[in-house]
Image (spheres, helix red, strand yellow):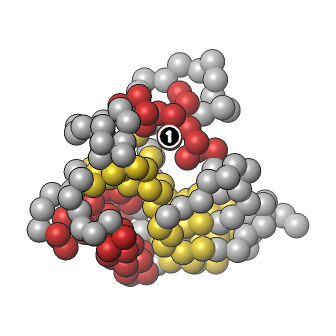
Amino acid sequence: MSAVLLDAADIKRTLGRMAHEILEQNQGGSNLVVVGVMRRGYPVAKRLAFLMTQIEGSTIPCGKLDTRAFRDDSKGKDFEDETEIPFEVNGRKVILVDEVIFTGRTIRASLDALLKFGRPSEVQLAVLIDRGHRELPISPNFTGRKVETDKGDHVSVKVQEMDGEDLVVLEKGAS
């Protein structure tokens, strides 16, 4: 059984709200950069950076971060790093973006990967969906939607850039 959590219009509104919240909490966009966790966190990050750029009237840079080599479940595998961070990270406020937070393990790997590029003054986490069930003490600063799930459930985020549509679906696991 599955249920639509967010359709395209919901995602658009949610990202608009999140962009305003990020700018408000940071007193504007100066010194902010946005880094999206690959795969689907990156398109979400690009949209947030674009929305913040429109609001502020000045460019908020955006990059993408490949965390595969830093994950604890992919040790020993060889990956070509697809990270693209075309700006300075040192001393900047980094808004780290992922589409879903679950256990926190991807974000832990993301922090390790990000620190290869320098030492930010601060890292803030923005997620489209927070589904709970953390294994690590990591929580987002900005959340699009918090969703109650069972551990066996799956949250599927589709983005236009990769999937041809914007949609968030909760797929119930076997109970």
Q: Which of 69 and 140 is in front in this view?
A: 140
Tell me: residue 77, above or below residue 10: above
Which residue is farthest left? 57
Judge left or right: residue 80 versus residue 46: right
Q: Measuring from the top left, give residue 1's x and y in whole percent.
A: 73, 73
Q: In which quarter of the image is residue 170?
A: bottom right
The amino acid type, in three-letter code, at marker 1 is Leu
Quarter holding the C terminus is bottom right
Q: Is residue 103 visible?
A: no
Q: Which of 124 and 157 is in front in this view?
A: 124
Residue 166 visible at all: yes
Q: Measured along the vertical axis of the image, is residue 86 above or below residue 21?
A: above
The one nearer the camera, 160 or 46, is 46
Residue positioned 53% across, 27% down in the render: 69
- Tell me residue 4's x, y (percent): 58, 77
Residue at 40 percent across and 49 percent down: it is 122
Residue 15: x and y, percent?
37, 72
Please name the residue shown 43% across and 50% down the image. 123
Task: Identify the image quadrant of residue 8.
Answer: bottom left
Left or right: 170 in relation to 60: right
Looking at the image, residue 15 lies above or below residue 30: below
Residue at the right extreme?
Answer: 175
Give the residue at x 73% y 50%: 135
How many marks the image carries: the answer is 1
Q: Name the residue under label 1.
A: 111
Quick check: 98 left or right of 58? right
For mark 1, does the 10 Å Cα neighbourhood hold few (<14), some (14 to 19), or many (20 or more) residues?
A: some
- The percent coordinates of residue 78 (x first, y second) are 53, 19
In the rendered view, does 103 fall on the left or right side of 99?
A: right
Tell me the element at label 1: helix
